[in-house]
Image: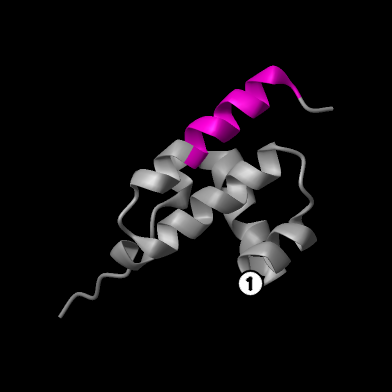
Amino acid sequence: MLTYMDLDTSRKLLALSRRESNARKRIRLLAVSLFLEGENRTNIAKRLNTARSSVNKWVSNYLNKGLEGLDSNTNLLKFVI
């Protein structure tokens, strides 16, 4: 069941995506926004022309970690010499 809170959060994520300069993060924000609006993950993947497994990962990361879960993971890969 979709709640007012989900729609409000969805709108906030959509607004964030419009201000986001990083294209990859923008797609992640859009995917979660659509999910919170009640769209299923398969349709989201088709609309955004991305893999369903990516949408699954982004939604899961958001649900577990909030906005921080949508940040790029490339910063986490650090090699010690």
Image: magenta residue range? 3-14
- Residue at the image point whose x is 69% and y is 19% from the top: 4
Image quarter of residue 5: top right
State the residue lying farthest toward the left. 81
Residue named by callout 1: 49
Which is nearer the eye, 73 or 33? 33
Expressed as whole percent of the image width and height from the top left, the position of residue 33 reads 60, 42
Q: Residue furthest bottom?
A: 81
Mark 1 Cα shell of 10 Å, populated few (<14), some (14-19), many (≥20):
few
The correct choice, above or below, for 67 with respect to 55 in the image is above
Against 19, is 22 above or below?
below
Closer to us: 44 or 18: 18
Where disc 1 sits, the SS reads loop
Question: Is any atom of residue 66 visible in this view?
Answer: no
What residue is shown at x 49% (from left), y 31% (from top)? 12
**Image quarter of the N terminus:** top right
Identify which amino acid the numbered label 1 is placed on.
Asn
The answer to whether residue 79 is above or below residue 72 is below
Q: Position of residue 58 (x, y in %)?
A: 58, 55
> Looking at this view, is 58 or 31 the one in front?
31
- Report the residue at 64% width, 60% height from top: 55
Tell me where residue 15 appears, x and y as whole percent: 44, 37
